[in-house]
Amino acid sequence: MKLKILVVAGDGIGPEVTGEAVAVLREVAQLGGHEFTFSERRIGGVAIVQDGTPLPADTLNGALASDAVLLGAVGGNEFNSLPPDKRPEAGLLQLRAALGGFANLRPAFAFKELTVNSPLKPEVVDGADIMFVRELLGGLYFGQPREWNRTTGEAWNTMRYTKDEVARVARVAFKLAQGRRKKLTSVDKANVLEVSQLWRATVTEVASEFPDVTLEHQYVDAMAMHLMNQPRNYDVVVTENLFGDILSDEAAVITGSLGMLPSATIGGKVDLYEPVHGSAPDIAGKGLANPLGAILTGAMILRLTARLEAESNAIRAAVRKVLEDGYRTPDLARNNPEGYQVLSTKEMGAMVRETVKTLLVNA
Ligand code: IPM
Ligand code: MN
C-alpha cells in the first residue's frame, strides 16, 4: 500500500522521538513491500524563528496533501511571554483546526513491565487499559470571545459547544466502546456549567443508538480521583477539550511515564498523530527522551490510516518485548535502578526496530 506521511517534528525532543518513529515505520514498509513516503515541514517554535509564524503556509499545504501527519511536540521556554496566538502552541491549534479532526484518541495502557514505575500500587494499575476520547476542536481552546484586556485587568475565554459537536465525538466514543469492553464514561462538570449540561444531555441522547454500551457520567473533579483509585474501572472515557487535556496527562501516572502515551486525531480531512507528551526542553538533544510514545503513535497510523492491523500489532508487541527484556529509557528507570539496561533515545528506537523486524519476519 501507499502512504504519504508529513512529519512536523517541531521543538525540543520532537525531532528525536519522531525520528525513531519514522525509522520503525520505514522498517515495516520495507518488510511488507509498502510504499511509505515521508516529507518534513516546520511547526511551532522552530517555525517562528525561521519563518516568522508557528504554522507556515507550506506546512499547512503539505499537511493537507498527506494521508497522515505525524507531529512531535511544540513549545519552548523562550516563547513563554508571547500571547497565545503568537506562541508555538498556536501553530498546533491552527493545524488541528485546519485538518478538522475532532476526536483525539489517547489510549492509556499500563504495560505490566512498567507497573513498578508508577507511583501507584502495582495491583491498582495492573491491567488498566483506558481509551480517552478528547474532543479536540471546541471548548475553551477555540471558543469566542477570548481576550486579555490589559486596561481593565480582565480576561476571559469561552467554553462553547454545539449539540452537533458533542454528538459527533460521542458517536466515535460509543463505537470504540462497542469494539472494547462496552463501557463509556462521559466526563463533565454538569453540576456547575451549562455547557456541560448540554454535553451530558447530548451524550445521553446519543446513547440510545448504542444499546449494547453502558453509559455512565462523572464529574471531572471526581473522575480525577477515581482514575488514580481504580483505573481498571474504565474502558472508554469521552470528554471535552480541556478536561481531556488534563485527564490524559494524569493518565500518564497509570502507565508509568508520559513518554509512553500515543494519540491519534480522526474525523477530519487528514488524520493527525502526536505523542501526548510535550517538547521537554530540559532534556532536548541529550538522547534522554523516551521514543516509545512516538513509536506507538506510529502504530496508530498503521492501524487507523493505513489499516495495517498486523503490522500495527507487531509494533506494540515489539515495545512489550523490549520492556520485557529489561530495556528502559531514563524516564522508565527511575524506580527500578537495578537490573535494567538504560538506553538512549536512538538505542531504544533501534531495539524496537530490530524486534519488529524479527516479529514480522517470523510471523
Ligand atoms: C497536548 C498539548 C497541547 C494541548 C498544547 C501543546 C497546545 O498539551 O496535546 O495535550 O493543550 O492540546
Ligand atoms: Mn496536554
Image (spheres, grey):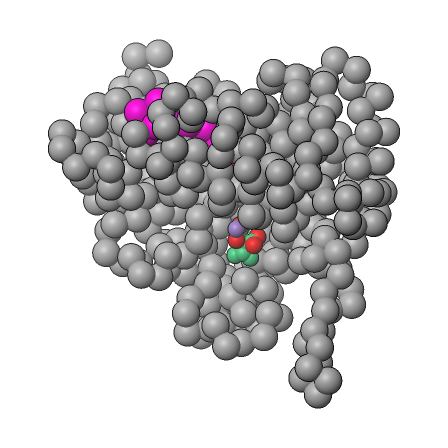
User: Measured along the vertical axis of the image, is residue 93 above or below residue 349?
Assistant: below
User: How far from the left and from the top, in percent, is residue 306?
Assistant: 54, 30
Do we see residue 347 in this rendering? no
Residue, far left: 338
Quarter of the image where one finds residue 73: bottom left
Residue at point 47%, 59% (across, down): 74
Residue at (44% x, 39% y) in the render: 252
Question: Does 318 lie within the magenta span?
Answer: no
* Along the line of sight, the residue nearer the viewer: 314 or 122: 122
Is any atom of residue 287 visible in this view? yes
Write down the quadrant of residue 186 in the picture: top right
Residue 321 left/right relative to 295: left
Q: Position of residue 124 (x, y in %)?
A: 43, 24
Measured as percent of width and height from the top left, residue 243 is found at 63, 46
Question: Front-most of 275 and 39?
Answer: 275
Total tally of numbered discs in the picture:
0
Q: What stretch is highlighted in magenta?
A: 105-115
Residue 42 on image: x %, y %: 47, 62
Which of 98/115 is in front? 115
243 to the left or right of 15: right
Residue at (69%, 45%) from the top-left corner? 240
Residue 154, placed above or below residue 38: below
Q: Is residue 72 left or right of residue 217?
A: left
Q: Does the magenta stretch include residue 106?
A: yes
Is 204 or 34 nearer to us in this picture?
204
Left-right relation of 5 to 361: right
Quadrant in which the C terminus appears: top left
x 78%, y 19%: residue:
210
Q: Quadrant of residue 34?
A: top left
